[in-house]
Amino acid sequence: MTYTATTNANGFFQSTGLLPGTYTLSITPPSGFTNSSDQAGTVNASGTASSGTIGNINLGPGGVGINYDFQEAFFGGGSS
């Protein structure tokens, strides 16, 4: 199953109604940006972060995951 979420102006996203299971988060950086660093958040202290993907997120019944973060770096654009 694939679920797509778009962040708000503060970079926050939310997914509700997920069934218990193991999940992976991935990001597609906006044009002009590249993946800089990722941080696995907390939901039963699980998740492994690497280059635009956070995997092995084990969501149990009633689990709530917070602070799963992707950091992007601007690498181009603009004119001189």
Image (spheres, rainbow, N blue to C red):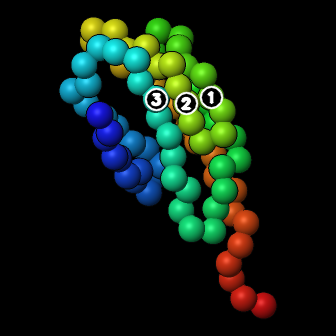
Distance from Cα at disc 3 to Cα at disc 1:
10 Å
Q: Amino acid at mark 3?
A: Thr
Q: Secondary structure at mark 3?
A: strand
- How packed is label 3: few (under 14 Cα within 10 Å), some, or many (20 or more)? some
Q: Secondary structure at mark 1?
A: strand
The residue identified by callout 3 is 24
Image-based side of 26 in relation to 16, left or right = right
Q: Amino acid at mark 1?
A: Ala
Q: Tell me which corner region of the image, top left, top right, bottom left or bottom right, holds residue 62.
A: top left
Q: Quadrant of the N terminus?
A: top left
Furthest toward the right, the residue is: 80
- How packed is label 2: few (under 14 Cα within 10 Å), some, or many (20 or more)? many
Residue 23 percent coordinates (x, y) = 41, 24
First of labels 3, 1 by sequence position: 3
Image-based side of 23 in relation to 36, left or right = left
The mark found on residue 49 in the picture is: 1
The residue identified by callout 2 is 54
Residue 63 in view in this figure: no
Residue 70 percent coordinates (x, y) = 58, 42
Say which residue appears at 37% left-offset and 52% top-offset. Answer: 6
* Mark 2 in CB contact with mark 1 (< 8 angstroms): yes
Residue 51 percent coordinates (x, y) = 66, 39
Furthest toward the front, the residue is: 1
Comparing 37 with 55, the one in front is: 55
Residue 51, compared with residue 22, is above or below; it is: below
Say which residue appears at 56% left-offset and 36% top-offset. Answer: 53
First of labels 2, 3 by sequence position: 3
Distance from Cα at disc 2 to Cα at disc 3:
6 Å
* Mark 2 in CB contact with mark 3 (< 8 angstroms): yes
